[in-house]
Image: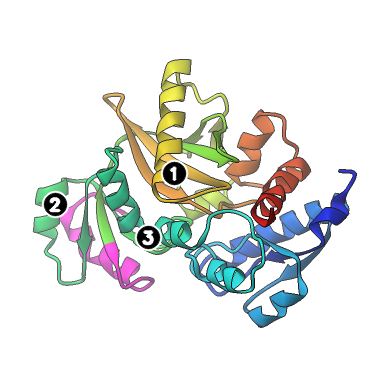
C-alpha cells in the first residue's frame, strides 16, 4: 500500500482477560506483523497489562480481542468514549453477538432458522430438557467463544457433568438440539459473504471444538464447500441477514449446519474471529484473492470510513 501513514498510530488490541487469551495473542501478533509489513505504524496493546486510558495516544484500534472484554461491547464502549475509530462491530452488536441466547432470540424473531434450545441451570432436570430437545444435545456456556466449555450429551447420565463444566465458565448455560449433518462457516467482509467453507473434523472429534480449531492439523477445510451454487447462495444470503439482524458490521463469521434433510441452521455469530494460521477468515479471503496482508488492511480500512 502506498500510503500507510493515513492510518496514523494503530493499537492492535490483543490478549485481554478472557478464556480465549492465548488465541487472541496468537491472532493479534499475526495481525501486528502483517500491518508492520505493510508499513503501518502499529503496536501491540494488551488491556490486561496496560490501562485502557493509554489508548488516547493512538489514532485507531484494530480489535483482535476474542471473548469477554473484547467481543462483547466492553472495549468498543471504551473506544467510543475515547472517540477512537475501531474495526468491526459496534457496542450493541458486539454485546448481542457474544450472547448466544440473545442472538437466537433475534434470529427467531427475524424468521431465521436456528436450532431449538433451553436455558439450563444446575437444578434443571435432564428429563425435561431431553423431552424438549431430544438426544443427543449440546451444552454451551452462553457467553464464551471458541467452543470453550461445550459438551455433546448423548445419554441422560452425562447431562449433569456437562452442565457443571459449562457453569464453571458462565452463569448462563444453554442446551441446544444437536443437528446431525455437515458444518459450514461463512465469513462476512465489508457487507459481502465470502465463499462458504465446509468444516470436516476427523471422525474421532464429536464437533469442531477448541482442540480442532487451534491444535489439530487434520481438520479438512472445503473451499469450494461442495454445495451447489444455488445452495451456497442460499446460505450466503441467510448469513448476511443473520449478521445484519444482530447489528454486526465490518467483518465477522457465522457458523451453520445443514441437516440430513437439507435444511440450514444458524449456530452463532463471531464478531472478532480468529486470525491465526488455523483460522477461517484468512482461508475464505484467500479464496477471493486476498493475501493475509491485504485482508488486514481491508479490515483496518473500516476505521477510515467510520472517521469520515
Q: Residue at x 49, y 63 (%)?
A: 91
Q: Is residue 306 left or right of residue 195?
A: right
Residue on which disc 3 sits: 99
As for residue 161 lying within the magenta part, the answer is: yes
- Give whichever of 272, 59 is nearer the camera: 59
- Give whichever of 308, 25 is nearer the camera: 308
Question: Which element type, helix, strand or loop, lies under badge 1?
Answer: helix
Question: Which element type, helix, strand or loop, lies under badge 3?
Answer: loop
Residue on which disc 1 sits: 244
Q: How many angstroms separate mark 3 from mark 1 (CA)? A: 15 Å
Q: Is residue 251 left or right of residue 259?
A: right
Graded by Cα atoms within 10 Å as few (under 14), some (14 to 19) or many (20 or more), the crowding at tag 1 reads few
Q: Which residues are magenta?
A: 152-173
Q: Residue at x 85, y 49 (%)?
A: 38
Q: Are marks 3 and 2 in contact (CB under 8 Å)?
A: no
Q: Are marks 3 and 1 in contact (CB under 8 Å)?
A: no
Foreground label between 1 and 2: 1
Kindly identify which numbered label has been placed on residue 130: 2
As for residue 75 lying within the magenta part, the answer is: no
Q: Residue at x 63, y 60 (%)?
A: 64
Foreground label between 3 and 2: 3
- Give whichever of 236, 178 is nearer the camera: 236
Kindly identify which numbered label has been placed on residue 190: none
Could one spot residue 50 in this view of the protein? no
Could one spot residue 229 in this view of the protein? yes
Amino acid at each position: 500500500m502506498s500510503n500507510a501513514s493515513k492510518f496514523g498510530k494503530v493499537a492492535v488490541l490483543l490478549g485481554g482477560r478472557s478464556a480465549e487469551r492465548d488465541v487472541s495473542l496468537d491472532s493479534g501478533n499475526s495481525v501486528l506483523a502483517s500491518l508492520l509489513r505493510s508499513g503501518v505504524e502499529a503496536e501491540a496493546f494488551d488491556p490486561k497489562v496496560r490501562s485502557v486510558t493509554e489508548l488516547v495516544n493512538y489514532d485507531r484500534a484494530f480489535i483482535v480481542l476474542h471473548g469477554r472484554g473484547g467481543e462483547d461491547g466492553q472495549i468498543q464502549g471504551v473506544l467510543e468514549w475515547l472517540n477512537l475509530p475501531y474495526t468491526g462491530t459496534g457496542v450493541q452488536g458486539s454485546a448481542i453477538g457474544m450472547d448466544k441466547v440473545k442472538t437466537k432470540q433475534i434470529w427467531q424473531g427475524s424468521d431465521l432458522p436456528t436450532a431449538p434450545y433451553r436455558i439450563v441451570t444446575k437444578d434443571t432436570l435432564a428429563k425435561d430438557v431431553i423431552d424438549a430437545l431430544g438426544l443427543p444435545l449440546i451444552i454451551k456456556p452462553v457467553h464464551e467463544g471458541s467452543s470453550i466449555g461445550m459438551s455433546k450429551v448423548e445419554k441422560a447420565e452425562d447431562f449433569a457433568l456437562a452442565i457443571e463444566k459449562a457453569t464453571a465458565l458462565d452463569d448462563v448455560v444453554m442446551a441446544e438440539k444437536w443437528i446431525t449433518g455437515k458444518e459450514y462457516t461463512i465469513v462476512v467482509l465489508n457487507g459481502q459473504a465470502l465463499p462458504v467453507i465446509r468444516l470436516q473434523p476427523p471422525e474421532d472429534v464429536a464437533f469442531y471444538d477448541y482442540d480442532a480449531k487451534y491444535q489439530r492439523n487434520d481438520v479438512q477445510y472445503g473451499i469450494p464447500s461442495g454445495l451447489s451454487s444455488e445452495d451456497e447462495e442460499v446460505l450466503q444470503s441467510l448469513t448476511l441477514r443473520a449478521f445484519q439482524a444482530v447489528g454486526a458490521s465490518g467483518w465477522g463469521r457465522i457458523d451453520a449446519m445443514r441437516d440430513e434433510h437439507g435444511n440450514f441452521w444458524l449456530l452463532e455469530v463471531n464478531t472478532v474471529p480468529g486470525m491465526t494460521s488455523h483460522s477461517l477468515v484468512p482461508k475464505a479471503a484467500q479464496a477471493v484473492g486476498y493475501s493475509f496482508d491485504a485482508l488486514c488492511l481491508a479490515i483496518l480500512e473500516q476505521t477510515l470510513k467510520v472517521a469520515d
